[in-house]
Image (cartoon, rainbow, N blue to C red):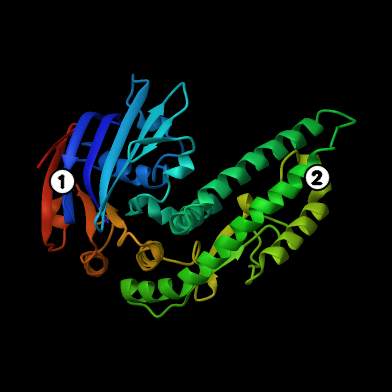
Amino acid sequence: MWISALQLNSFRNYDQLSVSLKPGINLFIGENGAGKTNLVEACVFLSDLQSHRANSYLPLIAQGRDSAQLSLTVTAGTREIQVATELNRSKPNRYSLNGNLKRRSSDLVGAVQVVVFSPEDLDLVRRDPADRRGFLDTAVIQLKPRMAGVKSDYERVLKQKNALLKSARSTSTPDLTTLDIWDDQLVAFGSELIEARLELISLLEPLIQDFYQKLAGSKDLIGLGLAASIENPEEDGTETLQSLTRSEISERFHSRISEQRSKELERGISLVGPHRDELLITKSGLPARSHSSQGEAWSIALGLKLALAHLIRERSQQGDPVLVLDDVFAVLDSGRRNRLVEYVSANEQVLITSADPDQMPNLDIASTFRVAGGVVDA
């Protein structure tokens, strides 16, 4: 799969842009703040409708504008696929696939496959559980696009349950007649999400071990596990789930909710479910978050992304995912730069941003673009 065309209107610092890309390595060079990352961010967003550096889509709309339009065309084998979206500040967003409007955003997810490496990826190892949950769910959806709908349904039910729990705190005789209904739905959607996360982890773990050892030049063992709230009573628990069937997950889920019911009513928030789970990453048996150097953490994060790209390539009928290297050469030492290039240079298409061409390893570049002030010149 490769992106052949990208169009932007009122997106970040781009008033209007139309650019054609080629298979192979496409290099975008420009000073910091010129708009290089904004350009590849649009490609990432049209893959899974999430930015890799913003929690909301609203910052993507140019200042002073009510909406932004972005679209891209990809070539996958003998097919062309066009994905487009209109982002709006004050009305519902609009989505289209091959010119046909779609009612649900999840209908677009999976049409384009993009895996991005960026400086923010260090957060996968070093920062909060939410960063690792985000990686898990993005990866699950890239491998199984229909899981976008499952995750959306889970979040909708969670919001409704939390609203009920919160309102129950403000009255002495709360009406909890619908709480069991919300719990049943939460378990149904949440169990499917947990099952998908466990399957993903089982696929990633042997791959990241290989990628990490080659990237870091180390024989340290990297372990992955799901520290789930249906297993641990507290969010920072370290007991990980083993392989379970959907029915076994549901049974534990229901049991844990029953155990935590009084605490949920007291605190006015749901304490059990995938929204409180953690991807536990270990290095030689110790938490990588606190027991890895900067270089080791980078190798783990890059290893996770390379493992994901490998899985997509194996399982997708559309060929390689598009790889985005967003200013990563500036934060990697020369050894890791060269080893990373070994893995990605044979990919069908790679988009690279850089403020300093001197930091680039020797590459066979298909196209070079100069970026300055929201203008892109080939």
Q: Determine the residue located farthest toward the right in the rendered image.
A: 173
Residue 353: percent from left, percent from top: 22, 49
**What residue is shown at x 71% (from left), y 47% (from top)?**
185
Indicate which disc residue 29 carries.
1
Residue 137: percent from left, percent from top: 51, 54
Indicate which disc residue 180 carries.
2
Quarter of the image with the C terminus is top left
Label 2 neighbour load within 10 Å: few <14, some 14-19, many 20+: few
Residue 85 vs 147, above or below: the answer is above
The answer to which of marks 2 and 1 sits earlier in the sequence is: 1
For marks 2 and 1, give the CA distance. Answer: 56 Å
Residue 324 vs 199, above or below: the answer is above
**Which secondary structure lies at badge 1?**
strand
**What residue is shown at x 43% (from left), y 23% (from top)?**
89
**Which secondary structure lies at badge 2?**
helix
Residue 280 vs 50, above or below: the answer is below
